[in-house]
Amino acid sequence: QVQLVESGGGLVQPGGSLRLSCAASGNIFGVDAMGWYRQAPGKQRDLVARVISGGNTIYADSVKDRFTISRDSAKNTVYLQMNSLKPEDTAVYYCNLDWRDMYRNGQRSWGQGTQVTVSS
């Protein structure tokens, strides 16, 4: 069983910064990608940023130049540095892991979510 433990959410004023962390543990035999999604009330869950196993990164247009995703492969941990936060960044942020089991089958796991609120 694979678990994702997130941390780092909270309340921040507009223009402020937060850093989210997500650590994966369990019987992981390979990682295809790690990333962050977010879901605001009444809206669908959308991609924020993603890092592929080769190191390539993908960002939503709304967060480019403000957010940075990084990964520590040895620790199976992914980070999201969020700068210049705006009220519209307010959402529950979910960590996502695409991984391989012992049979090399692709699997997907989600974290429990961490609330990020940007407000003065």
Image: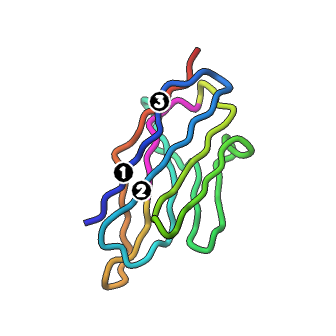
Instruction: Provide the secondary structure element on which disc 1 rests.
Output: strand
Q: Do labels 2 and 1 touch, CB within 8 Å?
A: yes
How far apart are labels 3 and 2 at the CA level?
Answer: 18 Å
Residue positioned 58% across, 32% down in the render = 89
Residue 113 to residue 108: above or below: above
| Amino acid under disc 1 | Val
The extreme top residue here reads 120
Q: Which residue is mark 1?
A: 5
- Above or below: residue 86 compared with residue 30: above
What range of the chain is rendered magenta? 89-96
x, y percentage for residue 22? Answer: 44, 52
Q: Quadrant of residue 26?
A: bottom left
User: Which residue in the rendered view is the most extreme toward the bottom?
Assistant: 103
Structural crowding at the residue carrying mark 1, measured as other residues with C-alpha within 10 Å and reported as few (<14), some (14–19) or many (≥20) = some
Labelled pair 1, 3 in contact (Cβ < 8 Å): no
Tag 3 or tag 1, which sits nearer the N-term?
Answer: 1
Where is residue 72? Give x, y as percent. Answer: 54, 63
Decide which of tag 3 and tag 2 comes sooner along the chain. 3
Residue at 36% from the left image edge and 55% from the top image edge: 4
Q: Secondary structure at mark 2?
A: strand
Quadrant location of residue 12? top right
Q: Which residue is mark 3?
A: 10
What amino acid type should be assigned to the residue bearing mark 3?
Gly
Q: Quick one: label 2 or label 1, which is nearer the N terminus?
A: 1
Q: Which mark is residue 46?
A: none
* 29 is higher (above) or lower (below) than 90: below
Query: Residue at coordinates 70% horizontally, 41% vertically from top-left?
Result: 66
Q: Which residue is mark 2?
A: 23
User: Is 92 within the magenta?
Assistant: yes
